[in-house]
Image (cartoon, grey):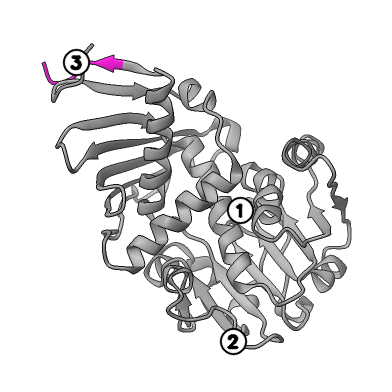
Amino acid sequence: MDRDDTTLRVLSASDIAGLDIGLADVVDTVEQAYRTLAAGRSDNPRKLTVKPADGHSVSYAMLGRDGAREVVAIKTSYKHGLHESRDKQHYYTTLTLYDDVTGLPVALMDCARVGSLRTPAVSALLARECAAPGATTALVIGTGTQGRLALPFLVTTLPHLDRLLLSGTHPDGIAAVRAELARHFPDRDIELVTDLGRAARDADVIVATAGPHTPAAVEADALKPGATAILVGHGLAPSTLHRADRVIATSEAQMRVTGTDMADPEGGFPPVDLELPAALSGAARARTAPGQRIFAYNSGLVVTDIALGHRFAQLAAEQRLGTEVALWR
């Protein structure tokens, strides 16, 4: 079918799963999105959120424009059953892309894999920008989707890491973390830790990816001088934020909206010293002294979903994946 303004390429989760993309490609794509945003060429408005009074579901809508790729997109996200266990929840997320040069639709895709890759890539970029010189030890807390991908991405941006620690309790998750690391770096392995406090004191970089019900909560006192603590999910106590020497965020506004569990008793947050796009652009340095303890907050920006989603759409088109739907006829 010839592409025109009535057809749309629909990419299912299985289509996206079949695309082969390297970790370095993902990191480069996400980094370019941040650099373009910092240069003022992209748009990333604040997300819209809808949540019923009883909190049983939450939905988001995010609109943005990538100025490097000249693509406009809308991401939607809906999760139902927030009070249920993860296996009983319903979660759907989609990304719709439009070419802002031709004016034609590019693709409608399941966005789960985009998010699962984008987030650990951002953590790895935060680690690269914030880690103290000579950092060699990384600790990941949690073995869910983000925990499984955190270490391969960290080694991609910080190849000199030679000690990889993991704090987790689920055997299947631990096995999945090992398998994912071996798939990308077969010469590396993890050390499973049982004393989280001791592991935190050893770590130069900590990435907390655990779920909301985790008992793990590393306190500021457990961080050694020069440590970088990156919050993706849960696993860090609020003291790591409030007693940090420097606070870095992908977005200060989003941190104040989505990071409410890290607020002080009065609901306050310390000021953010620098946002990641500015650090990546070279406008300022995330770390200004070797001994600083840095807290970094990883919240998604839709421009990174747009860039990575567009990269997937390009790969899918090259491989003729997906279904052409005459949506507007």
**What residue is at 72 percent from the left and 40 percent from the top?**
184
Residue type indicated by callout 2:
Thr
Q: Which residue is mark 2?
A: 288
Disc 2 on helix, strand or loop?
Answer: loop
Residue that numbered label 3 is attached to: 326
Q: Magenta stretch: dominant SS?
A: loop
Which residue is at the front of the view, 213 or 135? 135
Location of residue 193 in the rendering, given as x and y in whole percent from the top left corner? 87, 56
Q: Quadrant of residue 205?
A: bottom right
Q: Which amino acid, mark 1?
A: Pro
Mark 1 — residue? 212
Relative to residue 234, is residue 115 depicted above or below?
Answer: above
Horizontal and vertical percent position of residue 62: 30, 49
Span highlighted in magenta in the image:
324-329
User: Residue farthest to the top?
Assistant: 1
Where is residue 95 shown, x and y percent of the image? 34, 37
Comparing marks 1 and 3, which lies closer to the viewer?
3
Q: Is residue 327 magenta?
A: yes
Which of the marked residues, 1 or 3, is nearer the chain's N terminus? Answer: 1
Residue 299 at x, y percent in the picture: 47, 59
Image quadrant holding the C terminus, namely: top left
Tell whether position 175 is magenta.
no
Number of residues whose C-alpha sits closer than 10 Å to that of mark 3, classed few (under 14), some (14–19) or many (20 or more):
some
Tell me the CA gap for discs 1 and 3. Answer: 42 Å
Residue 323 lies in quadrant: top left
Front-lying residue, 76 or 165: 165
Decide if residue 83 is in sight here.
Answer: no
Whether the residues at callouts 1 and 3 have beta carbons within 8 Å, the answer is no
Taking the image as shown, residue 122 lies to the left or right of residue 300, namely right
Q: Sequence-wise, which precedes: disc 2 or disc 1?
A: 1
Q: State the CA–CA distance, disc 2 to disc 1.
A: 32 Å
